[in-house]
Amino acid sequence: MNNDLLYQIALTLVPNIGDIHAKALINIYGNAENIFKAKKKELENIDGIGTIRSNSIKYFSDFERIENEIKFIEKYKIAPLFITDENYPKRLLNCYDSPSILFYKGNADLNTSKVLSIVGTRKNTEYGKNFTESLIEGLQEQNVLVISGLAFGIDTIAHKAALKNNLQTIGVLAHGLDRIYPSQNKQLAKEMIDQGGLLTDFMSNTLPDKQNFPKRNRIVAGMCDALVVIESGIKGGSLITAELANGYNKDVYAIPGKTSDKNSEGCNYLIKQNKASLITHADDLLQLMNWTPMEKKQKKQRELFIELTADEKIILAILQQKDGVQIDEVYFKSGLSSSAVASALLMLEMQNVVLSLPGKVYKLA
């Protein structure tokens, strides 16, 4: 039995310990097993843990369920991704409520350079279908990873269009990997495992209950560089996902529609409230995200006759690795706090060393 995985899963099941507290404890103890072996008094003295949460940890005993889960994981060759694992989606690390552990079945690189989430109504119109297919067709040459929720409507259309255009696509589920919901998408899910994958933070035997979908949506919003909303009512789940993406500092785009069209009401609202930028074509997205292919140019070596701080040198070294680096990658590779990164980038921009591009991308000037 994998002891590391045993305690990692256990940490997600401890009452009163959610993802935020779990990550705080991991930062202190380094791994999940050390948390369970820590002294109760020591846990009590940690800010935010106290007596109730320390009791929940020390008296946790549901290890039989976890052992069964590990057998399920091994049998179906599922990849568990704990928050400290190398293959964990790095973009999620900057989301305060990111899952402590994910369960993944597939072959796509979750940390590929271009990731787009697409969400929308389950009751799409022909307009929404055509736009989704056209958008994804326009991304074909960019090797964009397409993420959605495997629901009826826009989600299903997006996944199918990605497969058709030889793009990898990930379905984020609101239940365990022992089932597919809706069941009509079973064949689609099989194809996605071969050309992308399925991802969830729910264990097996978890039903697609209503309360699970907002949790699912935070992964859809957090894993991407940009989120596109294609047809949504004013109270649709897509709007919740857009709000989450805005909160995670992601780029959000929406497709405009007729003012009389209920399916476009949510998109028009996001645009009107400046919570999403309007796009009408794949080229709009490519340009705004700086995903348009650049002509290969020979880079001339240059010396910078300016004095840089330690933080600025770290960021400069990251930006020298390639032509354009997304802010999430800067956070991850630098190991600096978000405020330290923001301050260093601002100073580098002021000294004309770094350029800020659309899509929160930075490059050397």
Image (cartoon, rainbow, N blue to C red):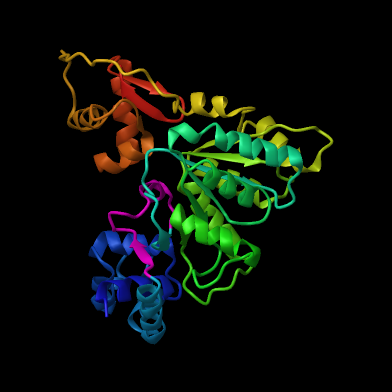
Q: Position of residue 115 (x, y in %)?
A: 45, 41
Q: Is residue 351 above or below residue 141?
A: above
Q: In percent of the image, x 46 and y 32: which residue is there?
A: 141
Q: Position of residue 108 (x, y in %)?
A: 40, 51
Please count the marks in the image.
0
The answer to whether residue 97 shows anywhere in this view is: no
Name which quarter of the figure residue 290 lies in. top left
- In this image, 21 relative to 216: left or right? left
Q: Nearer the viewer, residue 127 or 65?
A: 127
Q: In percent of the image, x 52 and y 50: which residue is there?
A: 220
Q: In percent of the image, x 35 and y 74: which residue is there?
A: 74
- In the rendered structure, does residue 228 fall within the stretch colored magenta? no
For the C terminus, the image quarter is: top left
Name which quarter of the figure residue 151 lies in. bottom right
Q: In percent of the image, x 42 and y 69: which residue is there?
A: 17
Q: Is residue 336 above or below residue 25?
A: above
- In the rendered structure, does residue 88 fall within the stretch colored magenta? yes
For the N terminus, the image quarter is: bottom left
Q: Nearer the viewer, residue 245 or 21?
A: 245
Q: Is residue 164 above or below residue 22?
A: above
Q: Position of residue 271 (x, y in %)?
A: 66, 32
Q: Position of residue 344 (x, y in %)?
A: 28, 28
The answer to whether residue 96 shows anywhere in this view is: yes
- In this image, 349 relative to 135: left or right? left
Q: Which residues are magenta?
A: 77-98
